[in-house]
Image (tube, rainbow, N blue to C red):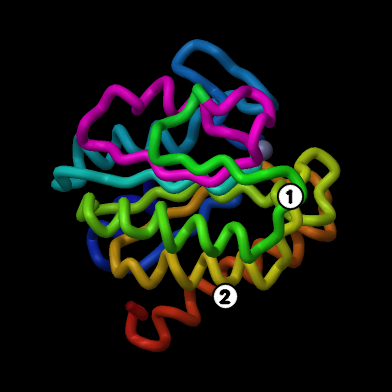
Amino acid sequence: MRGIDRVLAGDFAAAFAATRPPGHHAATRQPMGFCLVNHLAVGALHALETGGIERLAVVDFDVHPGNGTHAILGHDRRVLEVGMHQQGLWPAAETVGPASVALPRGSEGRVLRRAWQRHCRPALVDFRPGLVLVSAGFDAHRDDPLGGLGWRDADYGWLGEQLAGLGVPLVAVLEGGYEPAALGCAVPAFLAGLDASRDRGGGS
Ligand SMILES: [Zn+2]
């Protein structure tokens, strides 16, 4: 919530919350899938109530669908949910919004990049959000023991650049990611991507 206040005040372009446990499977009264409190949904409701914005977008790139976030925010027309997840993975694709893309097991970064360019980015640009909140899960990493996708550190860096390039105030929260060494490389790569794009004037 403090990160959201600061980016909406213009103090920073982006903020990252290294939250543990993760949150995107937790619903209002239902902890689930390692998640106790849905940090992103709490932040979204805080932003909509106090932040002076009309719309916000949620981007979830954890390997699992963010069912808790969808249960809390899916009915709210001020919120656009965009995501990329592994096809068929717990807790099932119908638990997230229609703008989410299911990626085949084993697919690598080029599949992620195509899905982003074809589906996610256009939906985000059309929606014109005043804030972007990111469920930044790192369990689609090729070394992660729970996920079955093949993303590399550079793919997370690219995703950071793409998100920063939207030119919208942004707060990312840490979701999944269960291989400590991979997490220790992929998170800094993602944050460097957020920074690199801004150094070049926001990207396009
Ligand atoms: Zn996950």
Q: Position of residue 6 (x, y in %)?
A: 32, 58
Mark 1 Cα within 10 Å, few/some/many (few <14, many 20+)? many
- The residue furthest top is 29
Which is nearer the N-term, disc 1 or disc 2? 1
Mark 2 Cα within 10 Å, few/some/many (few <14, many 20+)? some
Q: Is residue 173 magenta?
A: no
Q: According to the image, label 1 marks what residue? A: 149
User: Along the line of sight, which residue is nearer the eye, 130 or 92?
Assistant: 92
Report how far apart the C-alphas of labels 1 and 2 lie in the structure: 22 Å
The amino acid type, in three-letter code, at marker 1 is Leu
Residue at 28 percent of width and 37 percent of height? 79
- The residue furthest bottom is 200
Q: Position of residue 55 (x, y in %)?
A: 20, 44
Horizontal side of 113 relative to 80 (left or right) equals: right
Q: Is residue 81 magenta?
A: yes
Residue 175 in view: no
Disc sitting over residue 192 in the figure = 2
Ligand 1 closer than 8 Å to label 1 CB: no
- Kindly check if marks 1 and 2 are in contact, taking CB atoms under 8 A apart as contact: no
The image quarter containing residue 102 is top right
Q: Which residues are magenta?
A: 64-93
Residue at 55 percent of width and 48 percent of height? 61
Residue 199 in view: yes
Horizontal side of 202 relative to 34 (left or right) equals: left
Q: Position of residue 104 (x, y in %)?
A: 67, 44
Residue at 37 percent of width and 72 percent of height? 165
Mark in front: 1 vs 2 = 1
Give the structural element (helix, strand or loop) at label 2.
Answer: helix
